[in-house]
Image (cartoon, rainbow, N blue to C red):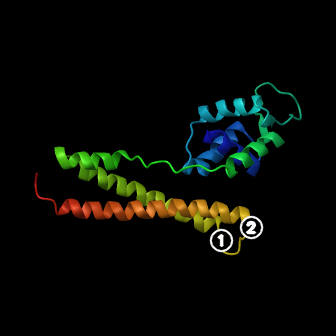
Amino acid sequence: MSLPHAILTALLERPSAGLDLTRRFDRSIGYFWSASHQQIYRELGKLEAEGFIRALPAAQPTRGQKKSYEVLPAGRAELERWTAAAQDPKPHRDTLLLRLRAAAVVGTEGLEADLRRHLDLHRRQLAEYEEIEERDFPPGNDSAQARLQHLVLRAGIELETFWTQWLTEALEEFAGLPDS
């Protein structure tokens, strides 16, 4: 149920056309809540049908013109309700960790190379997050919105830092394993 709330959040930050919204999603919310463009467009239709958003009137009706959407009071109320509701944390599921556990009983063939690949991917993601932090969160921007957005980004930085450290340790452990 979180995708509609992610879309409501993005539209409250800035009313947008569907294509603009999907591009913004890819550069912000999509880092921690991914959705395909088709899912976003489908959800826009549902949110409009539920009376949570509306298409802004166009200056001139034109066939094929982009529709821009804004959040209606009912949509804001729904987002406020959802934000305030208690939710339990979800159990972490990670295929790499499961594969590592399986390697303990079937051997490690191919796994070390994939650990290196994962380490490279996490290092790149960490560098991207740090670049965003430097660009978008300069010292002195103390608005509540900026502070909360920065808090979300810091979570991403901390997670990527964890994975780069853990994968480095895992590769050091692999180097000390006896040949199977």
Which element type, helix, strand or loop, lies under badge 1? loop
Residue 165 image point, x, y percent: 37, 65
Residue 82 image point, x, y percent: 68, 46
Q: Give me the disc on residue 180.
A: none
Q: How many marks?
A: 2
Amino acid found under the numbered disc labelled 1:
Pro
Q: Give me the disc on residue 138.
A: 1
Q: Which residue occupies the extreme left position in the image? A: 179
The numbered mark, 1 or 2, whose residue comes first in the sequence reads: 1
Residue 103 image point, x, y percent: 22, 47
Write the residue at 49% across / 48% down. Answer: 90
**Label 2 Cα crowd, 10 Å radius (few <14 / some 14-19 / many 20+):** few
> Taking 174 as reference, is 71 left or right?
right
Q: Is residue 112 visible?
A: yes
Q: Is residue 72 visible?
A: no
Question: Is the residue 93 above or below the residue 116 in the image?
Answer: above
Q: Which residue is mark 2?
A: 143
Question: Is the residue 17 above or below the residue 146 in the image?
Answer: above
**Label 1 Cα crowd, 10 Å radius (few <14 / some 14-19 / many 20+):** few
Amino acid found under the numbered disc labelled 2:
Ser
